[in-house]
Amino acid sequence: MTAPIKVLLAESDTVRLKRYKSMSLWRELGMSAENTASTAYEAVKILDNEEIGLVVAVDRPPVSSADIVLKKCAEKGIPAVVIVPRTEGAGIGRYFSMGACDVIAEPPSRTRLRHALMTARRYTLKDQAGEEYCRAAEKAFAVLKRGDQGFISKLKELIVRSEGETVTTGAAAEYFRFNRDYFGKLFKQETGMTFNSFYNNFRIEYAKELLGTGRLRVCEISELLGFSSVDYFTGVFRRQTGLTPTGYRAACQ
């Protein structure tokens, strides 16, 4: 089992810092948020002396300036997520230009923060996906008929890079640099099924992996996997497994 990714939380508001630190998201995503800083300069000192894998910085200048933290992160090659006041609006582009891998408005929803952390985690793990995600991908690819190796390899690359995102047929076609209709026909020819069928199968395999861990609620899994509602997710899950998500989780225990 891999060691947790060490996260540095930089936040000048002590109440909010305590709230962020206590979130269960860290454990769920294989992270540890024991390192904290209340000023930008304290954060820089920690980055110089500790092995930090990921930074979450709340921009509250001048005490806790994300600019200073981002500069150090860029210097050390550490991915960073920046949380900004909702009033920032159009100004968030500068954080990306300074190297932030995601920027989210305060207060971030649990789902939005999860997405940002998963994006940052891919940078930390050099585009390696999480364990549950990888196992689900292996199972989804196992049912495909053997097609052109180059095509399958590129498809695997797309899936690995898309943890935390929902891949549509259009997005997949764009990744392959084909028009949507041609991609759909080629996918069926190479794999024996449509892209939608393959991707839904993958999402259900991923849901099964997540349900087995017991870390996330059914509604959180539904939202994470991009289903429009919990009811729709439950219906798709039942059709493919014969069980409801709650029933499947109970059977795993």
Image (cartoon, rainbow, N blue to C red):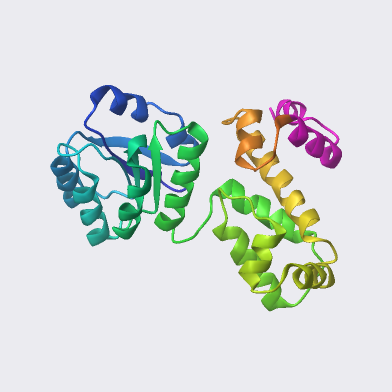
The quadrant in which residue 139 appears is bottom right
- Whole-percent x, y for residue 114 in the image: 49, 40
Q: Residue at x 22, y 61 (%)?
A: 75
Q: Residue 59 vs residue 239: left or right?
A: left
The quadrant in which residue 149 appears is bottom right
Q: Residue 10 vs residue 197: left or right?
A: left
- Whole-percent x, y for residue 103 in the image: 38, 46
Q: Residue at x 68, y 67 (%)?
A: 173
Q: Looking at this view, is 38 or 4 the one in front?
A: 38
Q: Looking at this view, is 162 or 2 the one in front?
A: 162
Q: Which residues are magenta?
A: 231-253
Q: Residue 106 vs residue 208: left or right?
A: left
User: Tag count in the figure?
Assistant: 0
- Whole-percent x, y for residue 209 in the image: 66, 41
- Does the magenta run of residues contain 241? yes
- Whole-percent x, y for residue 48 in the image: 17, 51
- Does the magenta run of residues contain 138? no
Q: Residue at x 26, y 55 (%)?
A: 73
Q: Quarter of the image containing the C terminus?
A: top right
Q: Looking at this view, is 238 or 132 the one in front?
A: 238
Q: Residue 216 vs residue 172: left or right?
A: left
Residue at the top extreme of this rendering: 15
**Is most of the magenta stretch helix, strand or loop?**
helix
Q: Looking at the image, is 157 positioned above or below residue 48?
A: below
